[in-house]
């Protein structure tokens, strides 16, 4: 199999669904061997033994690609080490790390927001990025390599349309991912290990907002959708497949001179609308 990342080995966290699934599938299509990391429940909702990571691996294999699954949480150091080690043990190397795993909690204003929700989100959305990157870097050296961190437009700008749209912990963690990305880029540029971030806008087709939606009334959902569409310059949401070409570009040698960058993928949200 040949493609833009042919012969490379990629780890994709949160790779079982939504944006992560689309990334893992295209990585494999473009020639990479993929470690699909996801701890979520079965995609079919029927209680099968296969979780989403295993299901994506099955889809990749059916198309002639190479992939293995990991159902370990990225919030613990020993798990991050085991995830990266599984790539080395199975495929012999690590070239690409996509830190995509993340959650969004019920969105309340800051003075109402719980410490428990803050800690739970930070453990996955920021601590997990540190733990997986720390271990992957050690095994990418002496280079080259590519680390791609999924941030958010909420890490670039605050947004309060008069009703819950994003939590303080989500915005803070995604802004932290941007600072993390740039520091790693500075530290490892000499070794040609590149570190870049993507800041997606309001993409549909993901499970990210499930907690917020579950706590929302039909009127809440209507107000939310109207508010975000009013601000998106292109007037429609993105979908996971819209994003994957940018990921492949950053993972491939085509972007060999690109590091320390944050690229918004938002239909004009940040670049056009003040």
Image: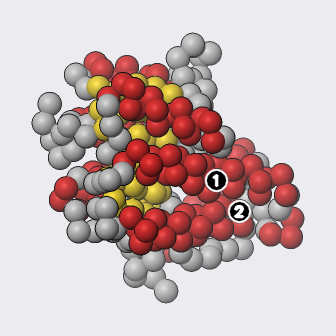
Residue 100 shows in this picture: no
Color encoding of the figure: secondary structure
Residue 139 horizontal/vertical position (percent): 40, 44
Above/below status of 113 relative to 23: below
Q: Quadrant of the N terminus?
A: top left
Mark nearer the N terminus (2 vs 1): 1
Q: What residue sits right under mark 1 in the picture?
A: 127
- The percent position of residue 94, horizontal first and vertical second, equals 35, 41
Of circles 2 and 1, which is in front? 1
Question: How far is disc 2 from disc 1 in space, using C-alphas?
Answer: 13 Å
| Foreground residue among 168 and 137 | 137
Q: Position of residue 26 (x, y in %)?
A: 29, 40
Q: Residue at x 74, y 49 (%)?
A: 120
Residue matched to label 2 = 169
Residue at 51% from the left image edge and 61% from the top image edge: 151
Image vertical order of residue 114 relative to residue 234, above or below: above
Query: In the figure, residue 46 lies in which quadrant?
Result: top right
């Amino acid at each position: 199999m040949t493609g833009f990342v042919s012969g490379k080995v990629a780890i994709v966290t949160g790779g079982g669904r939504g944006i992560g699934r689309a990334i893992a599938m295209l990585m494999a299509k473009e020639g990479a061997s993929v470690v699909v990391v996801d701890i979520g429940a079965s995609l079919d909702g029927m209680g099968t033994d296969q979780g989403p990571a295993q299901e994506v691996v099955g889809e990749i294999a059916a198309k002639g690609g190479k992939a293995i699954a990991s159902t370990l949480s990225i919030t613990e150091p020993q798990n991050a080490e085991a995830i990266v080690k599984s790539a080395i043990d199975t495929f012999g190397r690590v070239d690409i790390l996509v830190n995509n795993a993340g959650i969004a909690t019920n969105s309340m204003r800051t003075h109402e927001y719980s410490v428990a929700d803050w800690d739970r989100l930070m453990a996955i959305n920021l601590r997990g990025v540190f733990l997986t990157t720390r271990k992957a870097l050690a095994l990418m050296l002496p280079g080259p390599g590519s680390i791609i961190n999924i941030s958010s437009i909420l890490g670039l700008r605050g947004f309060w349309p008069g009703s819950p749209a994003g939590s303080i912990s989500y915005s803070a963690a995604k802004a932290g991912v941007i600072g993390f990305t740039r520091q790693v880029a500075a530290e490892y540029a000499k070794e040609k290990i590149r570190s870049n971030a993507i800041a997606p806008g309001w993409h549909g087709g993901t499970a990210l907002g499930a907690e917020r939606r579950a706590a929302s009334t039909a009127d809440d959902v209507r107000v939310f959708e109207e508010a975000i569409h009013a601000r998106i310059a292109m007037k429609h949401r993105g979908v996971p497949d819209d994003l994957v070409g940018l990921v492949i570009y950053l993972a491939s040698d085509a972007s060999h001179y690109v590091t320390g960058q944050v690229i918004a993928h938002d239909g004009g949200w940040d670049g056009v609308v003040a």
